[in-house]
Amino acid sequence: MYRYDQYDQNIVDTRVAEFRDQVERRLSGALTEDQFKPLRLMNGLYLQLHAYMLRVAIPYGTLDGRQMRMLARIAREYDRGYGHFTTRQNLQYNWIKLSEAPDILADLATVEMHAIQTSGNCIRNISSDQFAGAAADEVTDPRPWAELLRQWSTFHPEFSYLPRKFKFAVIASDEDRAAMRLHDIGIQIVERDGTFGARIYAGGGMGRTPIIGKEIKDFVPVTNLLSYLEACLRVYNRHGRRDNMYKARIKILVNDLGAEEYARQVEEEFAAMETLDIDPPLAEFERIAGYFAPPAFDANAPDEVDRSDPDFAVWVDQNVKAHKQSGYALVTISLKPVGGIPGDASADQMDVMAGLAERYSFDELRVTHAQNIVLPHVKKADLYALWQRLSKAGLAEANLDLISDIIACPGLDYCSLANARSIPVAQKIAKRFSDAKRQRELGELKLKISGCINACGHHHAGHIGILGVDRKGTENYQLLLGGSGAEDVSLAKITGPGFDEAGIVDAVEKVTDVYLNARTEGERFVDTYRRVGMEPFKEALYG
Amino acid sequence: MADFLHFRDDAPHDEPAVTLDAFLGQSNAGAVRIESGEDVRSLLPHLSRIRLIEISFPTFRDGRGYSTARILREAGYGGELRAEGDVLVDQIPFMRRCGFDSFAPAAEVDEAVLGRALDRYDHVYQPAADARTPVWKLRHG
């Protein structure tokens, strides 16, 4: 994985000093909260319902054991002993003191981490495929491209006061594990005539107006990528709406102009920019790519797995995926135990995962947008020992992509924007379906919960989505069906009137019953929905 | 404390700036003011005889002026480029990078804080409208 050189380290260290200066000015009263807000937001520090929340960047979701241990240490020293992994592959601490935030950043900087641009109207953390560098279906590792974007976007002087936040995702396979087309700009690395280039999608997003990103350029070579993206951002910065924050994302601009017209304007800017020497030489990309060379796999690692322990076999079938290297596997550690908070991990669990990564996965971990953790390079021969250790730490839930593998935002338990709680609804649904056999019988079912219209819990992209709203002072939950954030991307539709907290759990059960009765061989929930349509589900819910 | 900050060898140009419409209509003015929503590209044919372009920042959140400034510098404009309005001290380093060399903030700027902010970063990741060398160039010579 990428390692900082003297320049990267210098920039991050300087950021710590700068933020310390800004916090001191705030604490002394030299800055009002209004003046301080954009500064702290540019550094991932939010004022939430009960305390400050600090969002730490985990670029493209990749980290090593040393970094995970630091996240654990910070959770213990400055928070309440846990952290929350987010849908953008970051980590949030919920109980932070403003006066201690600079010390946390200083600690993070010692392990090449930061919180730069994890909030604010700027280019956010670049997200990617959690299986990058290991997936059997990728054409190349997308992370060098993501790291190139990370550096380019860090403290970009022109694009730090955009109309609204700006999110990139980069993938390099046809299977989309990063909800790429629901990002402001989604990039798929493709191969053409023996070279790699970026296929660019623009104007995707969730929030209150969900839109699927549209292709605006089929192939941009790496040596033009940054100037092309600079053109994309400039058109948005100049023409994106600023009169209404709910219409300020690039998806509204692209939708209003039409993707073709937006692409034409980008081309016009790009023609001028190409000549400005904005793009680093290929050697810089190659320098970065060198850090992502495959680890020293054992070519003779055996491919067989001893499945004699039935509980282990269940976990292997659910949470272990094919690796491109024979004898190795991709392991997803579920952070979704029944009754737990989706995406939360205790400091002790973080330490356990760090140790397991060091021992079994070439010292690498990944965060997934579904709020789980991946050990990307595990020898099949080590799977049983790994599973036993995960079991001891409460980390062996065999529910990847099942109904209890729920994406949920922090909701009204923490978030100042929320209208309704998300966590208790997630917990109740997981409990209702806690019978592991029943979950497996239901098969792949992506359930996603947001506590407000901003859609941090990706409800538009859920096979089953739940949106919490405030209805005359009480929490009410709308049910949506048929969304997907994957390569079969689609937006979920609302079934009808909402439900109270108990009612939404019953409603989820009813729609799964409809599915079980209607499905044909091999159909997932979302496939059946697409085939039979909304009516049978509506009938069961409201008929 | 100063309410006017200037980073040029020549003196601040004190001719009152006319609006973009007025400039394009009569065009013998040497100073023009661009509102944040206006398309600065209509000025490009006239740059050689303009001595001051003032770009308005109605609120610090409105970042259009950063692009406006870079477009002007990329087109070869060498005159005074002034940021006027809700310009905060912590934004001035980015504005300098986008080509602004003159500032008229609505609220007073603490010069000590500004000095620290401008000197702070030894390195930048990307080229812009200033002379700073991006780290990729340092890495590869």
Image: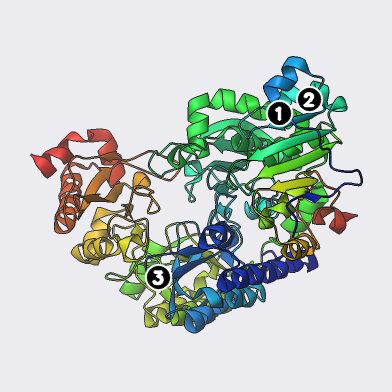
Residues at badges 1 and 3 in contact (C-beta under 8 Å)? Answer: no
- Which is more toward the observer, A114 or A216? A114
Q: In the figure, is residue A371 to the left or right of B50?
A: left
Q: Which residue is mark 1?
A: B40
Query: Whole-percent x and y of residue A541?
Result: 13, 44
Check the image and report above or below for B119 versus A382. Answer: above
Amino acid beneath label 3: Asp
Residue at 49 percent of width and 50 percent of height? A178
Q: Is residue A532 left or right of residue A172?
A: left
Looking at the picture, which amino acid does disc 1 mark?
A: Val
Classify mark 2: helix, strand or loop.
helix
Q: Are marks 2 and 1 in contact (CB under 8 Å)?
A: yes
- Report the Cα–Cα distance between label 2 and label 3: 54 Å
The location of residue A352, given as percent across then percent down, is: 48, 80
For residue A36, what is the image quadrant?
Answer: bottom right
Contact, mark 2 vs mark 3 (Cβ under 8 Å): no
Which quadrant of the figure contains the C terminus of chain A? top left
* In the image, residue A367 above or below residue A530: below
Q: Is residue A494 visible?
A: yes
The residue beneath circle 2 is: B44
> Which residue is identified by label 3?
A344
